Amino acid sequence: MAKVVVLGAGVSGHTAALVLRRKLGKEHEVVVVSPNRRWNWIPSNIWVGVGLMDKKDVTFELAPVYERAGVDFRQAKALELHPEGTADSATPRVTIEYTSEARRGEREEVPYDYLVNATGPKLNFAATPGLGPDGNSLSVCTFDHAEKTADALRAAIERMKAGEQLTFVVGMGHGSCTCEGAAFEYVFNLEFEIRNAGVRDNARIVFLTNEAELGDFGVDGLQIKRGGYVVPSSTFAESLFVERGVEWIVGAHVSRVDENEVHYETLDGEVHSLRFDFAMLLPPFTGVGLRATDRAGQDITSTLFAPNAFMRVDADYTQKPYEQYKPEDWPKTYQSPLYRNVFAVGIAFAPPHALSKPRKTKNGTVIAPAPPRTGMPSGIMGRTVALSIADMIRRGADKPTHSAPMGEMGAACVASAGVGFRRGSAVSMTMYPVVPDYERYPGVGRDLRHTVGEIGSAGHWIKRILHTMFLYKAKAKPGWWMIPE
Amino acid sequence: MSTSIEQSRHAMKPTPWVLFWRSFLPYQLYRFVLINLRMFVMIWKSH
C-alpha cells in the first residue's frame, strides 16, 4: 500500500488527485491537503469581478467531492517538509496545520510515499506598498477579492451615473508580475460593463502593465500569420485597445499605491504617477514559503526551493544570458532532483527562466514579466505527474514514465472581452509550443500552423462552455476523466 | 472614451466589415467549430 499526498487543490493539484485516485486501487491512499474548503475556477473570477457571477457560480465545496471520489481531504496548510523523515522515523512526512473551523491551528505530521507539491502561489501584495485589497487597490485573484471588486465597480458606475468623471486603472501591480492575460480580460470586461451601463463617456480606462509590449502575456508575445504577413500579437492587442478606447502604459513597474494614486517607473527610467478612482492591480507571485529539513533537522529549504520559494524540479537552472536560454532548460517530469518521490506542478515549480526578455531601467529596476504556468499547462502537469506516480507505485517504475515539457506543450487560451451570446466576444488563441523554440522555428519561435488568434462571438461561446465543462470535470461527475485539461 | 491620439494613430483599426464578421452568426458558428478543432489538435499534441 502506498500513500500519495497532494499539497494544494487548485487546477494542477486537484487534477493530480483525481487522476491518481482513478489510476490507483483502493489499497492505496490519496490525501489532499488544502487550506481552502472551496475549489475555485479562477479563470471565471473576472466575471465575478464585474458582477456577472457570484461566488457560488465559480466555486464548490471540496469535501463532498473528495468523499465521493475516495480521496482523504484535510483542510489544512502545509508548513514543513521532511523528505528524509525525522530522527524518530525515516518515513518522509509533511507537517500541516489545520485551517478548518473545527481543528483550526492543530498540527499534524502526515507521512507519505509520494508527494505532489501543487501549492500554487502566495499572492505577494507586500512586494508593493499599498497594493491589494488590504491596501489601496483591488484584485480578482480570489473569489472574495473579486466580489469586493464587483462592489467597488457598482459603486463607481453609480457615481458616473450621477455625472462624475472617473479614472479606472487595471493591470499589474509590480514589475515581476505574471498572468497579464487575466488583467487583459478584466479590463475589457470592465469596459464592456461600463458601456452597458451607459456611462462609457464618463470613464477613462488605463491598462498599466509590466509587459514591454501589449500582447506579450509573459510568453514573449505571439507571431500570427494573417493576410499574407506574419504579424506580432502586439499589433492585434493594440488594435483592440484602440477600438475599445482603453489607454495603455507598457513596461511599468508599480512602486507604490497610495489612496487614489499609483506610482510607477517605466523602462526609460522615468517615474510617473497616475490618479485613479478604481484600481484593479494583480500582485506578483512567490512560492507559499514551505520549509524543509533533513533527517537531522538541518534546514534544507534553500536546496529544495529556489530563492523565490518555488520548488526546484528537473530543469536546468544555470544562469545565462536570455538569448542562450533553450526550451530544453524547462522541466520534463517535474520530479525533484533531490528526492525521487517529490514532484512540483503548476505554479509551485520553479521556472528555469523568463520567456519574455527581462529588462532593467537606467535606475536598475528590473521589469520582467514572469512566465505563466496556469490553466491548460497546469492541468497537463498535474495529470502527467499523477500518471508517473501511478506507474511507479503499480509497476515499480524507478523513474517517472510520463513527461510534459513546456517546450513541447501547446496551450489554448480564451480571453473574454465581454459577455453575451450575440454581443459578447473573446480572443481565442492557441500557441505551440509554450516555450518559444527559435532553433526549430527560426525568427518566430513557434509553429505558425498552430499559433493562431482571433476575436469574435465564437470565442465567448467557447469561454462560457469551458466554464461549465471544467466545473463539471472538477466536481468529478460521471465521465469527468474524458474531459481533457 | 478615446485612447490618446498618439496611441490611436499608430495602431491598426478594424473596419466596419471586420466588426460585422466578428458577430455575424453563421460565420461565428463556422469559427466556433474551427476553433474547437484547433484546440483539440493542441490538446492532442500536448498530452
Image (cartoon, coloured by chain):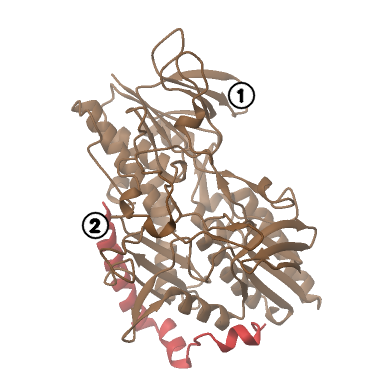
Residue drawn where x is 74% and y is 62% of the image:
A262
In the foreground, A58 or A230: A230
Residue drawn where x is 74% and y is 57% of the image:
A257
Q: Which mark is residue B27?
A: none
- The image quadrant that residue A315 belongs to is top left
Q: Which chain is red?
A: B
Question: Quick one: SS at disc 1?
Answer: loop
Relative horizontal placement of residue A115, taking residue A283 as reference (left or right): left
Residue type highlighted by circle 2 = Trp
The outermost residue toward the top is: A88
* Mark 1 belongs to chain: A
| Residue pointed to by mark 1 | A102
Q: Are marks 1 and 2 in contact (CB under 8 Å)?
A: no
In the foreground, A358 or B18: A358
Question: Quick one: SS at disc 2?
Answer: helix
Q: How would you rate the neighbour count of disc 1 (Cα within 10 Å): few for under 14, some for 14-19, many for 20 or more?
A: few
Where is residue A276 drawn, in percent x and y?
75, 67
Q: Which mark is residue B44?
A: 2
> Is residue A122 placed above or below A297 in the rendered structure?
below
Q: Colour of chain A?
A: brown
Residue type highlighted by circle 1 = Ala
Do callouts 1 and 2 point to residues on the same chain?
no
Where is residue A381 drawn, in percent x and y?
35, 45
Relative horizontal placement of residue A113, taking residue B11 as reference (left or right): left
Residue mark closest to the camera, 1 vs 2:
2
Where is residue A326 drawn, in percent x and y?
34, 55
Where is residue B22 drawn, in percent x and y?
43, 82
